[in-house]
Amino acid sequence: MLVAALGGAFLVADPIECIEDRVFDFTAGLNNFFAANKAAKFTFMIICGLMMDIMLLTQFYRFAMFGTSWRFLMCIGCFYVLRFICQVSKW
């Protein structure tokens, strides 16, 4: 195995085709738009954050009225702890 690795027995002369990221290529126009328009980007981020807050409040109401286990609160707690760690570490 060492001889094969050092000797280049598995190297091929033909070009190797890589995976193509079609979703990235498809959304390149949106990426360019938001990179050029900071106000639109921040507005979109605020709207998405508001929708996430509404979803969280709706699910918390559903848990408070009809919940039978603590799974939802534990998942939300883990999510926000991990989010806090990522924000503090500035990844």
Image: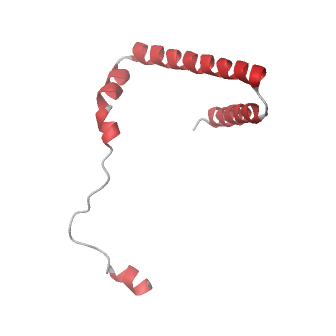
State whether residue 71 is above or below residue 49. below
- Could you tell me which quadrant the C terminus lies in? top right
Task: Judge by depth and name the residue closer to the eye, 82 or 65.
Answer: 65
Where residue 35 appears, as percent x and y from the top left, is 36, 24
Task: Judge by depth and name the residue closer to the eye, 34 or 6.
Answer: 34
Apparent side of residue 81 relative to residue 13 in the rendered image (left or right): right
Name the image quarter holding residue 66: top right
- The residue drawn where x is 21% and y is 71% is 13
- The residue drawn where x is 57% and y is 15% is 50
Name the image quarter holding residue 90: top right
- Could you tell me which quadrant the N terminus lies in? bottom left
- In the orientation shown, which residue stands out farthest toward the bottom? 3
Q: Which colour scheme is used?
A: secondary structure
Where residue 19 appears, as percent x and y from the top left, is 32, 52
Where residue 49 appears, as percent x and y from the top left, is 56, 19
- The residue drawn where x is 31% and y is 81% is 9
Task: Judge by depth and name the residue closer to the eye, 16 or 71.
Answer: 71
State whether residue 51 is above or below residue 32. above
Where residue 23 appears, as percent x and y from the top left, is 34, 38
Task: Judge by depth and name the residue closer to the eye, 40 or 68.
Answer: 68
- The residue drawn where x is 63% and y is 36% is 86
- In the orientation shown, which residue stands out farthest toward the left? 14
Name the image quarter holding residue 30: top left
Apparent side of residue 69 relative to residue 45 in the rendered image (left or right): right
Count up the numbered dots: 0
State whether residue 34 is above or below residue 24. above
